[in-house]
Amino acid sequence: MPNLNNVSSPSLWQRIWQGFLTTVGTKQFFQIFSPWVKWLAILASLCLLIGSVWGLAFAPPDYLQGNSYRIIFIHVPAASLAISIYFSLAVLGVIYLVWKIKTASLVAQALAPMGFLLCVISLLTGSIWAKPTWGTYWVWDARLTSMLILAFLYAGVMALFAAFEHTANRGKAAAILSIVGAVNLPIIKYSVEWWNTLHQGATFSLTEAPKMSADMWMPLLLMIIGSYLLVATMAIYRTNTLILHRDQGKAWVKEYIRAQHK
Amino acid sequence: MQPYFYSISEFVAMGKHGVFVWSCWAITIGVMLAFIIYSRRQRQALIKQLTIQQARQAQRTTKKSTPITKQYD
């Protein structure tokens, strides 16, 4: 005999789920994360400043590449973030399409231009680095080509966000492209192993000790942490702008706008 | 900890690789700063626009609800 009490009172899981859905509402997102922006920004700038000075002035040069390797302190964080942000766009796309959580779509919309810019920066710094190291700015090799495709995917996602901005289906097309385009991510990741390539393998991995000296990988780690923090800061700030725009008719936004001028 | 370079000119030159290293830094800092400023302007413009909208709405409602009457001091 099934327990009939379950029918009237929601189970613990249902209550937790409902609680989760309300906390990820736009208003809650705005109120919870707004105060984080300042502190994350300070932490990010500290990491990036220390990492830059350490990497540029204090780290020893590479025995083969000389000082040109110092580009790694920009190139690797930018490339790593370009890939991570696209992955998060795909995850947010699934969350938006399956559970219809608006905030997920707004976070994705806020993140997409950031990912695009970081992807372009990683391509530019990579090709500038390639000149003294490989003797050419560009080769059509697997890693570089798949990274270029990622930049185009970002541009597509941004265009779809802009195109459906004023329709009932806003964010859906962009979410679908984000999910489909995620096929490219493992191709980028394993391109250096599957094909013969000029590009070197991963510098960091979670399972092995770094192959560089501590004076080189510590500033790199600082730069990576700093840029993740910077992206988090920008993501919150830009999402909150989108939330204010979308919820401008709501009472809490009106109150917030009024409070801005006191 | 010791800085690797002995002089400022050595630091700028980076042993023939100065152009490559510094152009990367310049591009990245320029793009990121521009994006941060753009995002900030976007927010400020939105707040300004919503403030004006609110002021207009407030004016309209007060005009409707309280018809102009003679002022006595």
Image (cartoon, rainbow, N blue to C red):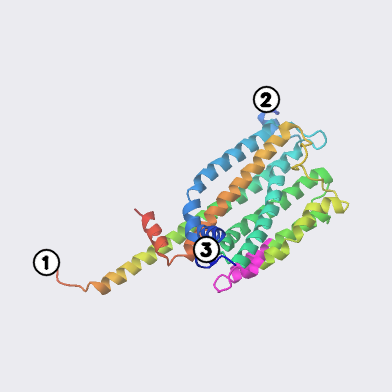
Tell me the crowding category of disc 1: few under 14, some 14 to 19, or many 20 or more residues within 10 angstroms, Cα based. few
Whether residue A161 is in magenta: the answer is: yes
The residue singled out by tag 3 in the image is A10
**Residue A68: quadrant of the picture:** top right
The disc placed on residue B2 is: 2
The dominant secondary structure in magenta is helix
Mark 3 vs 2: CB contact within 8 A: no
Between marks 1 and 3 in the image, the one whose residue lies nearer the viewer: 3
The disc placed on residue B72 is: 1
Q: Secondary structure at mark 2?
A: loop
What amino acid is labelled 3 in the image?
A: Pro
Q: Is residue A146 left or right of residue B44?
A: right
Closer to the camera in the image, B27 or A239: A239
Q: Chain of mark 2?
A: B
Q: CA distance from mark 1 to mark 3?
A: 62 Å
Q: CA distance from mark 1 to mark 2?
A: 80 Å
- Say if residue B50 shows up in the picture: yes
- Which span of residues is magenta-colored? A154-175
Mark 1 vs 2: CB contact within 8 A: no
Q: Say which residue appears at 60% left-offset and 50% top-offset.
A: A231
Q: Position of residue A132 (x, y in %)?
A: 80, 43
Q: Position of residue B66 (x, y in %)?
A: 22, 72
What amino acid is labelled 1 in the image?
A: Tyr
Q: Is residue A105 left or right of residue B46?
A: right
Q: Are marks 3 and 2 on the same chain?
A: no
Q: Position of residue A235 (x, y in %)?
A: 57, 54
Q: Secondary structure at mark 3?
A: loop
